[in-house]
Image (cartoon, grey):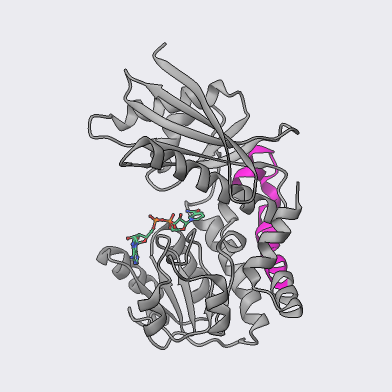
């Protein structure tokens, strides 16, 4: 057996939650990875996707694993799911065969005997997960199109934000990133009667969406849109965006949407209503947890419940003079 697993250390996140870091190596099959998994005296199952990308060094991979697992812990608690957070990061390198790497990873996940259920993240697609499913059952078994559950959850969060902002007819909505989530979200919103603009460096994605949306498609510029829906990578709400885009509501699926130097307080001061990312983008993990528990039938109601949860946060934030981020994070932190 060429698979080796070593417990490297335990690290705490900024909120004091503790994560065990496991280093996973399989020299024969080219796997180098870390799993950060939340410690839990109650033995609850940990959920979190697999991110695969090149890392400059092992420490940056370890840091990212813990930061992403910490974000999962917050998201799971805010969504009131009785589960804990985890994340795998795979250090991609040119000699690795993708098929071998995911097979080795499947053997590792299988060896944890259900303590951890994995799923997709950047660099890991349905084909990779299918390969893993042939070797272990501890992989999210989701029936929906990739990104669809997340898009439905973001749509529910947006509806709550628009009602709160008293913007039943909000004008044009601008979607950044027209991939799995952004593409589905744009279709859902257009079906709901909204006009949509969108940006993506991938011309094919833009053209396919424009064709699908027909008259609802309003081009590629965010200028003049009231709502910005970040569904690409993190850190895209930066000074340049704020200078150009003068809308008042932000609600999207990307994790860690704010660029360094911009905080929730800055958006509040600019009278921008920002729905915290971990509150809006929990659809996929909700789907994964329900599927693991054989409760798929509850998915539509669980996704719809994101809306009232966001409304509550926005109301409380207004009442207490806090940012929605602070209220949502403290609600999540109050859960064990
Ligand atoms: P995806 O890879 O399918 O789509 C991302 C799209 O963004 C691609 O079309 C890409 O070309 C585009 N893009 C990249 N850089 C861009 C930029 N600077 N401006 C505009 N577009 C850009 O990914 P996805 O699964 O749709 O996920 C989107 C985001 O939502 C990611 O940040 C992801 O971490 C987050 N998220 C996704 C899920 C899910 O269910 N897929 C769940 C939670 C969070």
Tell me if residue 79 can be seen.
no
Tell me if residue 122 can be seen.
yes
Q: Is residue 51 above or below residue 20?
A: below
Task: Name the side, left or right, on which 278 lies relative to 230.
Answer: right
Q: Is residue 301 above or below residue 73?
A: below
Asked where in the image residue 293 lies, by quadrant, the reply is top right
Asked where in the image residue 320 lies, by quadrant, the reply is bottom right
In percent of width and height, residue 270 lies at 53, 84
Q: Nearer the viewer, residue 239 or 154?
A: 239
Q: Is residue 246 above or below residue 20?
A: below
Give the overall secondary structure of the magenta segment.
helix
In percent of width and height, residue 73 lies at 62, 47
| On-image quarter of the N terminus | top left
The residue drawn where x is 44% and y is 34% is 130
Residue 109: in magenta span: no
Q: Nearer the viewer, residue 234 or 151?
A: 234
The residue drawn where x is 41% and y is 31% is 33
Q: Is residue 56 above or below residue 318?
A: above
Magenta segment range? Answer: 287-311
Q: Nearer the viewer, residue 95 or 206?
A: 95
In percent of width and height, residue 245 lies at 41, 83
The single residue placed furthest to the top in the displayed view is 1
Residue 307: in magenta span: yes
> Quadrant for ligand 1?
bottom left
- Total numbered labels placed on residues in the image: 0
Task: Name the side, left or right, on which 8 lies relative to 102.
Answer: right
In percent of width and height, residue 64 lies at 45, 45
Task: Name the side, left or right, on which 224 lies relative to 46.
Answer: left
Q: Nearer the viewer, residue 85 or 266?
A: 266
The residue drawn where x is 71% and y is 60% is 330
């Amino acid at each position: 057996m060429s698979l080796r697993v070593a417990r490297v250390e335990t690290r705490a996140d900024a909120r004091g939650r503790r994560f065990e870091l496991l280093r996973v190596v399989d020299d024969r099959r080219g796997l180098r990875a870390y799993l950060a998994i939340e410690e839990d005296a109650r033995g609850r199952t940990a959920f979190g996707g697999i991110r695969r990308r090149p890392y400059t060094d092992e420490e940056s991979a370890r840091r990212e694993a813990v930061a992403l697992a910490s974000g999962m812990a917050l998201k799971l608690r805010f969504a009131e799911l009785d589960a804990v957070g985890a994340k795998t990061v795979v250090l991609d390198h040119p000699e690795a065969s993708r098929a071998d790497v995911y097979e080795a990873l499947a053997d590792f996940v299988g060896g944890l005997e259900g303590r951890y259920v994995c799923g997709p993240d950047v660099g890991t697609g349905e084909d990779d997960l299918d390969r893993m499913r042939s070797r272990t059952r501890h992989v999210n078994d989701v029936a929906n199109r990739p990104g669809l559950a997340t898009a439905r959850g973001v749509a529910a969060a947006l509806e709550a934000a628009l009602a709160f902002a008293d913007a039943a007819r909000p004008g044009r909505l601008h979607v950044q990133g027209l991939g799995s989530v952004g593409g589905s979200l744009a279709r859902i919103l257009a079906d709901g009667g909204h006009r949509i603009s969108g940006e993506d460096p991938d011309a094919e994605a833009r053209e396919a969406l424009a064709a699908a949306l027909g008259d609802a498609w309003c081009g590629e510029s965010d200028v003049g849109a009231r709502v910005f829906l970040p569904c690409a990578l993190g850190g895209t709400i930066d000074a340049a965006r704020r200078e150009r885009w003068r809308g008042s509501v932000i609600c999207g699926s990307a994790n860690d949407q704010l660029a360094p130097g911009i905080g929730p307080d800055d958006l509040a001061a600019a009278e921008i209503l920002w729905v915290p990312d971990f509150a809006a983008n929990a659809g996929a993990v909700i789907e994964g947890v329900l599927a693991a528990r054989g409760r798929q039938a509850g998915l539509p109601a669980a996704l719809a419940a994101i809306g009232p949860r966001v409304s509550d946060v926005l109301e409380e934030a207004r009442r207490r003079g806090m940012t929605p981020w602070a209220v949502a994070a403290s609600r999540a932190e109050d859960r064990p």
